[in-house]
Image (cartoon, coloured by chain):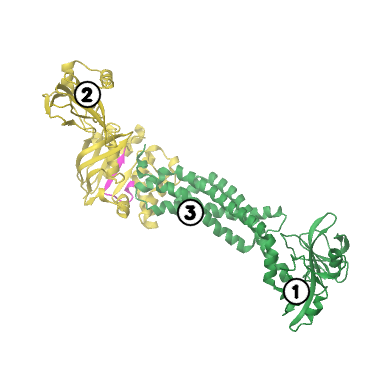
Chain colours: A yellow, B green
Amino acid sequence: MPEIRVRDLTMEYSSGGYVVRPFDHFDLDLATGNLALLLGASGCGKTTLLSMLASILTPTSGSIHVGDVEVTGLKGAALAAYRRRTVGVVFQAFNLIPSLTAQENIYMSMRYAGVARKPAKSRSEELLAMVGLEDRMHHRPGKLSGGQQQRVAIARALALDPPLIVADEPTASLDYVQVDGVIRLLRELAAPGRVVVIATHDERLLPLADRVVELTPRPSSESRPPDRVELAAGDVLFRQGAAGDLVYEVDSGRIDIVQEQSDGGENLLAVVEPGNYFGELAPMFGLRRAATARAGGEGPAVVTGYTLRDFRARRGEITPTAVLDHAGDGEIGS
Amino acid sequence: MWLVSVRDLQFRARRFVIAVIVTSLVFGIALAIDGMRRSVQSETPAIVALFGADRWVVAQGATGPFTTTRVLGATAADAVRRQPGVKRADPVVLSRTVIANPAKDANLVGHVLGGLGSPPISEGRSAQKSGEAVLSSGVSIDVGARILVGGKAFRVVGKTPNGRYYFGVPTVFVSLRDAQEIVFKGQPLVMGIAVKGTTRALAGTTTVTNSQVVSDLNRPLAGGVQSIVVMAVLMWLIAAGIIGLIVYLSAIERMRDFAVFKATGAPSRVIVGGLMLQAVIVSLVAAVVGVGVSKLVGLGLPFPSELGAAGILQLFAISVVVGVLASLAGVRRALTTDPAVAFGG
């Protein structure tokens, strides 16, 4: 305890009329004492996953277990109790209450949870001392530096000693001087009995991590044998929202590139004929597939997938501009 | 809960001070005009009680001595006095008149000197003969001054703290005969007979109780009183609107705070209670200041504004209600805040 088990997690929401699916049958296991980093490009779903771990967002399907608690099924008082007692959240923008002092920010989070005045006061003072801010107890957030505010936010997240700490870009608003103290503090929190999950772009945190979860594949520089795929009419090659590291060439038949709409319908973006290619944006920029590719027409289709390196070797060097132009022509890239 | 509310009030002190000032002005005006209503509603029973009568005899068809245009002969009082159970029966003349130089509207009460209708004296003495008058409050003429009432000369011999009616109009108390001279050119006619004891109607007359007289006198005032009540209610609504606006703006500014509260599992009652408490604090502080404002406003009103402990208590009760109602929009806004907002950068 706690052990975090994420199983078959799918998160789907509507944005601008089409379906966004940052997680599609996603699995994750984290052991107690782990500090896990969620890495990935903006929009890949790092904060969404943190929000689901904190039970602020509910996934479309799948399960999240924190210890013995099935988080996705929580409602009402049980949900509030989980948020109070089981998970501590460190926000990117600190989110301290501006009218309260550093000490009161921590004190109030305990009072809401029913902790009596005296122990809440002494615990808040103890936590501020732990994060090195005993001389800033009675300062409002506006009188604290970004690093100090983030340390107060971490102390607040620890107030009820939760077994799970989630931190969203905890170093994003800090300068390099302030980052040091925050990084060290986060590392110390990942002790037996607790899991710390950090969503970040900040690769300086990599050496601290026990576990790195890449939510989008890094552009591959490897070479590997081509992946030949035969598709019957209507078979799906890849789905919108899936990770992808191959660029495909159509050998025979045709491939329809369609975008799933939030009303359940589809929008045909392009038809890729033999000799043409598609799906290069995802591996090149580390993005998820922005559309679904499937065999179109009446008959079967055959496609061959290449890593970016092999594709370049076949077609010659392709620049990002050329890729975007290709995508813009309707021969959809990702 | 209270700590967050109080700290937020301190944090946004300037805005809340402005809200308190504006709301206290509205409260003060509301309180002053409500005081007028209280005053109007209390002066009617007071003037009727001043006569010390148990029942009244008026002309058949009249609804009361203060409003009637049907008069009785003064000798009817003699017949009433002869009835068993009647301890005293004094005729009265009740009318509107004008005190000259400068012209001021007044009520005229003509009564048997020393009889029913003689007012209590706070300064000077009672009228003892024709040509002497006692004035109620509401007219700044000193004892000893000479005045013209309805064209007849009087010397003011006394003042009474009571006696104003018809929306605070002051009253001149004179002898029955003087009043008959002013109103009836000396004819021995009266509006009614105030009776101490039990009586029954004579031919051509009817008897009315004190409460019937009060209702009769209040009837022409009902429209004015209703207008005052409507104005007061509008003032309370305006006050609620001001506080509601301030609390709503505060709620909008604090959306991220509320998102954090929800994301960290703070119960909804913390959010609801905090906003309501803020609104009630603003409202109560405005009510305290409003009491002072109402005193100042009352100085400029042509009618007396009777505040009293009941009025102040009522103000505080209303201000709590106003505060709670005012906070509802902000509460709704806060409760619908998505906790995921807290994750924004």
N-terminal-most mark, 3 or 1: 1
On whether disc 2 and disc 3 are found on a single subunit, the reply is no
Instruction: Indicate which disc residue B277 carries.
Output: 3
Type of amino acid at the residue the image marks with label 2: Val
Figure quadrant of residue B183: bottom right
Quadrant that contains the C terminus of chain A: top left
| Chain letter, disc 3 residue | B
Distance in Å between CA atoms under marks 3 and 1: 61 Å
Near-viewer residue (B104 or B287): B104
Figure quadrant of residue B43: bottom right
| Chain letter, disc 1 residue | B
Instruction: Indicate which disc residue A216 carries.
Output: none
Q: Which residue lies under the disc numbered 2?
A: A271
Q: Is residue A330 left or right of residue B110?
A: left
Instruction: Indicate which disc residue B205 carries.
Output: 1
Residues in magenta, as a range: A157-168
Type of amino acid at the residue the image marks with label 3: Leu
